Every structure is written in structure tokens, then in C-alpha cells.
Amino acid sequence: MKNSLRALQRRTVAGAAAISATALMLTACGAAPTSTGSASASASDYTACMVSDSGGFDDKSFNQSTYEGLKKASTELGIQEKHVQSKADTDYGPNLRSMVQANCKLTVTVGFLLGDATKEIATANPKSHFAIVDYIDPKFPDNVKPIVYDTAQAAFLAGYLAAAESKTGKVATFGGLNIPTVTIFMDGFADGVKYYNQKKSKSVQVLGWDKDKKDGTFVGDFKQVDKGKVLTQGFLDQGADVILPVAGPVGGGAAAAIKEANAKGATDKLIWVDSDGYLTAPEYKDVIMTSVQKTMTDAVETVIKQDKDGKFSKTPYVGTLANGGVALAPFHDFDSKIDAGTKSELDQLKKDIISGAVKVQSPSSPQQQ
Amino acid sequence: MSATTLTPTSPKAAAVDKPVSWKVPVTLSVVAVAALVVFGSMAPGASATFGISTDRDLLQLPALTVSGVAGGWVCALAMLALAGYSVYLARAAAKLPAWVPIVFGALFVVGFLIWVVAGARTTSISLAGLIAGSVTLAVPLVFGSLSGVLCERAGVVNIAIEGQLLGGAFTAAVLSTVTGSVYVGLLGAAVAGALVSLILAIFSIKYVVNQIIVGVVLNVLISGLTGYLFSTVLTRDPEHFNAPGRLPIIEIPFLSAIPIIGPILFRQSVVGYLMYIAVAAVWFGLFKTKWGLRVRAVGEHPQAADTVGIKVNRIRFWNVILGGAIAGVGGSFFTLVAVDSFTKDISGGRGFIALAALIFGRWNPIGAFLAALLFGFADNLQSLLTIIGTPVPSQFMAMLPYAVTIFAVAGLVGRSRPPAADGIPYVKG
């Protein structure tokens, strides 16, 4: 009896060891920094690194666009690059530390969610440089450069366009989480619709976001694509016909719902966010009217170049309509369907926002913090 | 421990000897008074409108409009009457009939809907959309909880439901794209779920590793594996690996045109119909067949089962495999029905909600099914209410599914008892 018990224990331990070893191996696959040496022989020892948030570098959205910037910098400047994906909120600190230990000169962290981890690690490692996309904090030490976007400006244009293109007089937006980098889109969108209503004395309604109450419809994360679809069906049931999902890959769920409705004869439209969805999510191109773009690729490349040339500064980079950091993407297939009058109004509106004649305000905007 | 009988003690038989419980009457009374205050005296002045028919229904019923004040008072007073009836029965030491809490719960939901919709910015909501969306959100939960029922009734704790769903979703997307047939993908999803289960079965039954640890590790493993393959293979060439297409929606003529129940019962994909069939089949199998009796015996008292010649570990092994296959089919819902591509961690923690539905449903397939529907309903209601713009903050609304669960488990369902040998490996000797 005693012997068999001992044998049993041995088996248990061996089994547990085997299974946890496999798990470790696989997690390691996902998390170990992947480095790509530059092809050129004169490859400098300058290394730029990047840590994603839990969305991953293939989110067809802001992690992906940022990573493209790193890749571009690596080929064009002939530098080394390392990148690591975070799987959960608890990965941010360890991933950042591993980058510092890997001798990264500049580490770009992607997203609001990495704000606290970046502040902590940057304070502890004053000799390393950091850049963080989409987050700004007055308490950042001198070695952190925020790369932020006044997305509300481009979203304002999208709101105006949506209101002009809506046949039902109802447009909608929803977010992944109620965080500033998401709600800034929703603020701009709602104000754009409001501006349209004032100009044209119409009363187009915005569903899913109440700017004054700072509350609206949220999926709860950036993963549950099917919930995004059910949510969008809810909006369509309530009569909305232009939808702006600000939820990364969950936008695919919204696109699926709109495709289904259009197959039954509706003419509902989608506005993609972060990247030009027509190019990054081509499977939905027949419903994507336009996208509210943040051109992160170029901004990231510029910041890396500046740091490599020894011109690092903590002054934030703020993407605006004026410097092309944010933009309304081309209409592509919808180009012929959008009224020429609306297009020229949008061009004028863009000029007015740049000149300051039309003020776009959002409590989440980096310029008002 | 004497093993004279194989049937588990029925909760009904135990209740006869117990003194009269005041828990239900007290819960009902407290809720009824709260309803009187909130739905009645704080009723919004506007009326609530509920859309019943969709454009595709044969029978076009007009939308239902209910005055916030009148509807609120009627529901609250009816709830109070039921609470009074339950107090009266408890005083007379009589047993409370099962319909009382059910009707009470339904009245609460109706009263709440009238109150919240009448108080919103847009005072109309599509009832058909609310119900249809609830079922859509519930489908993966139902499959997941059925997987749990099969495993745990045989005495193996299945924490790996999340991994089985995710494995099914991934395999369905890839196999459908590669072979060009969504049905092959559906089959592949079942096999993938079963393979995840195979690891669970080997480690927990053969090597008697702690079942909870194996389950947790499996979830991490599948999430890592599918995430890795997604990043390296699927995103590089989505045309050839991640464009599965959709399972067609099969409409049953005439029946599918019935308002509200038509779309949920008779306008579904294969996976939707399989869900109803699976719930019925698992219930029938577990409670009406020799196989089911053996499974339950193994889960309650494996020694006793062994002494009468039942192969305990073989039954456990096959049940775990079958459970995995069912969860795998549920996972295919994400990539073949809801949307037509795989994205990282698309199951989004629903495996854990399925686990909660299983416990809430007292390890019974029909109970788990109803619990999953309730979770789906609360989830969808919560988002629809933010769409129409309720005065209640969205964070409170997000609590709704969990508040409903706590209320239902603590106040109405009573003690939820797992199979006696759940989670305990069986070693002869």
C-alpha cells in the first residue's frame, strides 16, 4: 500500500512536471523578445525595442501600426529591433524590464494600459530612453517621450460625414473600454454630429455615447468579437445606420453585423479606426466608408530616428490634422457614393479645425491635459 | 460509508425532513418592497415601447406601449402579493410551489424593463432583438456548460472549457478555410475540443495530477498556441488560412416567421440547432439511460460503482473526451456563425462563465442551459440599455449579470451540490 502510494506520488509529480514544462515552453514561444538583425553590414549596435499591450502586434489596429513603424525604422536606418507581446496586464512590467536588460536604447510601449509600468521602469532606469504611444502623464521622468494624438479632430470629421450620410437620422459608436484613448474618438464623433446638426438645422442622434455624462456602450474588453456583433445588431435594431466601433479587433464583429444587414437590403456603413481599414481589414472593405486614422507608423519612425541621432527630447509628439498625425482616410469604394457637396464641406471643416476657427474639445485630448 | 444504493440522494427527499425555511419568503418580501419603492413610487412619467415583430416576421404585431407608472405599480403590487402568499405558506408550514419564485422573477424582469426603458433617452427597445441577441451570446456558454456537466457528473473537474472553446474556434476557422467546407471545420472543431480533453483525461485520470491545475495549464497552453499560430501563420496569409466562410442559416418555413420565438428556435445555423439537440440529448442520456446511471454512480461513489463492475476510469475518460467535443462545437460558433474569422483569444473568458452557469444550474443540463440563457440575457440587456441611454451608469449595468446570479443562487436556487466524487481521482486499491 505504502509502495503504491509512493509510486502514485512519483507519477503525479512527473506528470505535473511534464505538463508545466510544456506550458512554459509555449508561453516562452509567445513572450520571448524576438529580434531581427538588420541585413546591412554596417548595422549599428543601436537597438530599438517595443512592447505591445494585450492586443498584440497583429490587431489590425494601433499595436500593428506602431510595430510597422519599428520595422520601417529597422530597415531604413539599419538598426537592431526587438519586440515582445504582452498577453495580460501583468506582463507589462516584466516585459519592459526584459527590454531594459536586453540593452535597448529606446523602448516604445504601446498604449494607455502600459502607462504606469512605463513610468515605473523609466524612473528606475534613467539611462534608457522610452517612448509611449497614446499616453501622457505630467509625472513622467525626463527619459520618456509621449507620442499622443488629438484623435478627436479626425473623429469630428467622421461624425460630420456620418451625420451627412445617415438616412435614418441615427448614428452610433461604441468602445472597447471606457478609457481616454477610446473615448476621445467618441467625443469627436459626437461633436462632429452636433456641428452638422447646428449647420444644417437637423437633429441626427448619436447612440452609444453621452459626452456630458462620459458614459456609453462598451464591450468590456478588446476580444469578444461576437459581442461586438450582437451590440451592433442592437444599434441597427434601434435604427442607426452608420457605426463607429472603437474597439480594435472587435470592429470585425460590427462589420459582420453590417454585412449581414446589407445582405438583406440595408445600406448600413462602418467607420474603422486607427488604421485605414480598407487596407488593413480588406475582408470588410465593402462596408468601410472611411477610417479615423492615426498615422503612428511615421511618428514612431521619426522618434526612433531622432533618438538614434542623439536628439531625444521629452517634449510630447502630438499628432493633429495640421501635422498629418491624425486624418480621415480616403473613401475608396465609397468615393462615388458620397455627395460632392459633403466632400467640399469636409475639406473646409478640416481647414477650419487646423486654423482654429472650429474648436474641437475633448477632456481626453492631449492638448487639454 | 455504506454503498447500498447507487442513486444519489435526491434534494427533494432531503427537504421533507427540514423545518420550514424562511429564506425564500424573506428574499421575496425584501425584493417586492424594493420594487414597490423603485418601480412604483419612482416610476418615470414616460411610456415604454417594446418592438415585437421584426421586418421578416409573417405576423406583424404592433409595438407594445406600457405606461411607466401603471406598469411599474402593477408589477410591484403583483410581486408583493406573491411575496405575501409565500409568507402565508411558510406560516402554514406548507411547501412553496415552484411557480411562485419563477413568476416572481419574471415579474421582476418585466417591471425592471418597463422602469428602465421608460426612463431612458429613447423610450423604445426591440424585444425581438433583445431575445435573439441573448440567445446568440448564450450559445457558446451552453455548449461549454454541457461539457462541464459531462465531465463533472463523472467526477472530473473541467476548468479547461475556455481552452476547448478556443481550440474549437481556431480549428474550425483554419480547417474550413483549408478544405473549403464549413462542415469539415465544424467536425474539426469537435475533434480539437476532444484533443484538448484528451490531455486533460490523460493527466487527470491516468497520472492523477490535480485536475484544476491541469485545466488552468491547458487554458494557458491553448491560448498561447492559438495566439502564436495566429500571429505567425494566420495573419500572414488570411486568404488561405483565416477566411472560413459562414455556416448557412437554415430557416424552417412558417415557424421561423413567428414573432420573437421564430428567430431563436427556427432561424438558426446548424450549431444553433445542435445546441437544443445537445441539451436534450445530454439530459436524456444522463437521467434516462443505463449509461447515465453509471456516469452518475462514478461521479458520486466510484468505489461502489467499481464493486458492481463498472469501469470507473474508462467511463470518466470517455466522458471527458465527449465533453471536449461538445465544447469544441460550441467554439466553432465564434468563427463559423458569429463572425467569419479567428482573432486572438476570441472566446474572451466565456469558458469561465460557462463554468459558473454549470454550477448555477446545479450540474444539470437543463439547469445549465437556463443559467446560460440568463447570463446571455443579462449581458445583452446591459448593452442594449446603454444604447437607449439609461440614467443608470454603465458600470452598474455591467454588474447586472453578476447581481442576477448572486440573487438567484443565494435567494432562490439554494445549495448547489456538486457530485460527491467531483475532482477526486479514483485509484483502485
Image: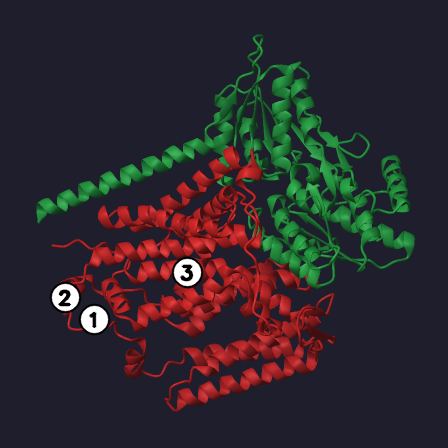
Q: Nearer the viewer, residue B48 or A150?
A: B48
Q: Going 64% across and 47% down the picture, which residue do you hit?
A: A251
Where disc 1 sits, the SS reads loop
Residue beneath disc 1: B6
Disc 3, SS: helix
Q: Which residue is mark 2?
A: B308
Tell me the kind of residue under disc 2.
Val
Q: Mark 1 and mark 2, same subunit? A: yes
Which mark is on residue A130?
none
* Residue B317 shows in the view: yes
Q: Is residue A352 left or right of residue A262?
A: right
Q: Colour of chain B?
A: red
Query: Label 1: chain?
Result: B
- Residue B379 % position (x, y): 56, 61
At 17% from the left and 45% from the top, the residue drawn is: A8
Whole-angstrom CA distance, mark 1 to mark 2, is 10 Å
Depth order, front residue of B353/B167: B167
In the rendered view, would you say B243 is above or below B353? Answer: above
- Type of amino acid at the residue the image marks with label 1: Leu
**Quadrant of the image occupied by residue A279:** top right
For the colour green, the matching chain is: A
Cα–Cα span, label 3 and label 1:
25 Å
